[in-house]
Image (spheres, rainbow, N blue to C red):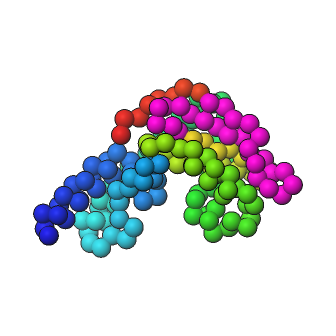
Amino acid sequence: MKKKISVILAGGLLAGSLGFTAQSITADGNTGTFQSPQNESQEKFKKKADESLESFRSEIINEISSTTGFALGNYEQLMRDDLHKNIDRYPGLMDMIAKIQNKQAVGDVIPYVFLHKNGKKGLVLEKKADGSNIAYQITVKDNKWEITSSRTVKGKKYNR
């Protein structure tokens, strides 16, 4: 049992150092952190993994924003938990994101959603495993979110 736990923790540390956590899952479902740490060792691991995740998120978002030409100054990120909790506030947005995710391949990064401060438009940023960056422009039409255009550019390929 002790050997099994150390193997799991070692694998988790490796995954955590690469940016995988329960809050950022690639299309292949890789995760590497504890939802609720049970001891100090797990708490330290979770903190390090969360810091790694935040660094990875920032790097990906900044790269997609700069390569696609979309400045995010007037946009606020809509976190997945907030979207789930307020699904009625964003009609069709979850379905639209699900359609994007259903087309993802192993290693693609789950899309990030940004809504403009005016609440009527937004961006969905996606990073593909091959390095491609995709920015989907979205708007509310007839009280439902939909993709109005997209821009795909070559970006940095991340080795995981």
Image height check: is 130 above or below 33?
above
Residue at 25 percent across and 53 percent down: it is 11
Q: In the figure, residue 137 lies in which quadrant?
A: top right
Image height check: is 80 above or below 38?
above
Residue at 73 percent across and 67 percent down: it is 88
Magenta stretch: give its range. Answer: 127-152
Asked whether residue 91 is in view, the answer is yes
Percent position (x, y) of residue 63? 53, 34
Left or right? Give the position of 113 relative to 23. Answer: right
Percent position (x, y) of residue 158? 41, 35
Percent position (x, y) of residue 136? 68, 40
Quadrant of the snapshot with the C terminus: top left
Left or right? Give the position of 138 relative to 6. Answer: right
Q: Residue furthest right?
A: 142
Percent position (x, y) of residue 6? 17, 61
Q: Nearer the viewer, residue 93 or 76?
A: 93
Residue 75 painted magenta? no
Q: Residue furthest top?
A: 154
